[in-house]
Image: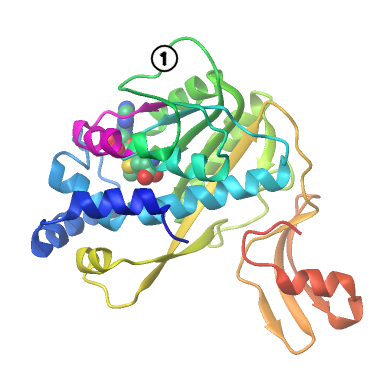
């Protein structure tokens, strides 16, 4: 998955002239803070160089994860087309761009971001997103609801009590759908499962990825996560000191709504394994179970459909 062209050009312009060595060092420092899930009261992105490192090293991947989760929402609620977005922890506006790409009718966005450096780049890029009305704030507005509320890669920066308070607050501002995305690590998935419990208890309808409201059937060391392949630009390769021209971004997510959707029979929760005349799919099923299904050519249309499926798809 690639960034929209206007965003890619804006990022390239923001990175122009930054010495590769400085970007790589800042990117390394940022990765270490994220990996350690450091909560020391400081912003991970505390200055412009750190924000530029985020643009080079993280934005393409978080964009791909959010965009993939939005696709899953459209699969369950094809009629949903948000006009108003609220994004908490907006960073450089990642969810704004992904939402505008998924639903070009998006008309207004309220973006909450505490880091001045992130806001600076986000506000510079946002006018090119095609969304007419964009407002940047540091706090969630006290009134009003938004069709879509997003919270991507933020929960890991908060402690458990702050997470629950924030999710309750964001749900109260959700007119239709709330999407939460986290890194696809066991800890990220644990945070998603905690807020899933909280939101289902508040009466939210499950949209994705789970095709049911029962407890998650996966047992540790297994955990529910998905993956998106992201092309690495030259500057991304330099920032990460990498050779491979792509990376696989692992992510976990939860989409819930005030309105019900048409949940699939199952969702593919691991990379499919193909063989001659057969395909093996690890499925999370609408009855709340997870198991691996072997689907053979003898099953005709079901096999043809199964063969085309990828990790994360509905079945
Ligand atoms: C990892 S970045 C994610 C940015 C964007 N959502 C994305 O997916 O690319 C997390 C962002 O949340 C912001 N953030 C964390 N706590 C916040 C708070 N209490 N209020 C506003 N922004 C916050 C951080 O400054 C940072 O820019």
Tell me how the rendering is colored: rainbow
Query: What's the magenta region?
Result: 110-125
User: Measured from the top left, where is residue 202 in percent x and y?
Assistant: 64, 23
Q: Residues within 10 Å of mark 1 (few under 14, many from 20)?
A: some
Q: Spot the residue most to the bottom.
A: 276
Residue 287 pos. (x, y %): 81, 50
Q: Is mark 1 within 8 Å of ligand 1?
A: no
State which image quarter holds ligand 1. Answer: top left
**In the rendered image, is residue 30 in sight?**
no
* Nearer to the camera, 90 or 224: 90
> Magenta stretch: dominant SS?
helix
Q: Closer to the camera, 213 or 268?
A: 268
Viewer can see residue 145? yes
Question: 240 above or below 68?
Answer: below
The residue shown at (73%, 48%) is 211
Rendered residue at 76%/59% (across/down): 315
Tell me if 238 is positioned left or right of 179 in this view.
left
204 left or right, relative to 254: right
Q: Secondary structure at mark 1?
A: loop
The residue located at (69%, 25%) in the rendering is 203
Asked if the stretch drawn in magenta spans residue 274, the answer is no
Residue 284, picture quadrant: bottom right
Magenta stretch: residue 123 in it? yes
Residue 233 percent across, percent down from the top left = 31, 66
Which residue is denoted by mark 1 in the rendering?
141
Decide which of 221, 184 is in the foreground and name it.
184
Q: In the rendered image, which quarter is residue 61 located in? A: bottom left
Which residue shows up at 19% across the image and 54% down it?
15
């Amino acid at each position: 998955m690639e960034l929209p062209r206007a965003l890619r050009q804006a990022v390239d312009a923001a990175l122009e002239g930054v010495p590769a060595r400085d970007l790589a060092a800042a990117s390394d420092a940022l990765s270490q803070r994220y990996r350690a899930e450091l909560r020391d009261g400081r912003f991970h992105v505390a200055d412009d160089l750190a924000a530029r490192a985020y643009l080079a090293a993280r934005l393409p991947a978080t964009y791909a994860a959010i965009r993939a989760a939005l696709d899953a929402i459209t699969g369950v609620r094809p009629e949903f087309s948000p006009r108003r977005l609220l994004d908490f922890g907006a960073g450089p506006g990642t969810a704004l761009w992904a939402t505008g790409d998924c639903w070009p009718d998006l008309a207004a966005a309220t973006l909450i971001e505490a880091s001045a450096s992130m806001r600076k780049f986000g506000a510079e890029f946002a006018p090119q997103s095609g969304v007419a009305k964009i407002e940047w704030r540091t706090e969630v507005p006290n009134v009003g609801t938004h069709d879509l509320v997003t919270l991507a890669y933020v929960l890991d920066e908060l402690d458990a009590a702050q997470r629950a308070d924030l999710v309750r607050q964001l749900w109260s501002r959700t007119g239709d759908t709330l999407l939460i995305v986290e890194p696809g690590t066991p800890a990220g998935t644990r945070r998603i499962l905690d807020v899933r419990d909280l939101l289902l208890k508040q009466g939210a309808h499950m949209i994705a990825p789970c095709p049911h409201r029962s407890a998650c059937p996966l047992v540790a060391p297994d955990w529910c996560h998905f993956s998106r392949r992201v092309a690495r630009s030259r500057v991304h390769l330099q920032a990460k000191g990498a050779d491979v021209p792509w990376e696989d971004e692992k992510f976990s997510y939860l989409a819930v709504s005030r309105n019900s959707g048409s949940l699939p029979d199952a969702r593919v929760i691991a990379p499919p394994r193909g063989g001659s005349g057969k395909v093996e799919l690890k499925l999370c099923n609408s009855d709340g179970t997870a198991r691996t299904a072997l689907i053979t050519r003898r099953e005709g249309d079901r096999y043809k459909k199964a063969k085309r499926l990828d990790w994360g798809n509905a079945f």
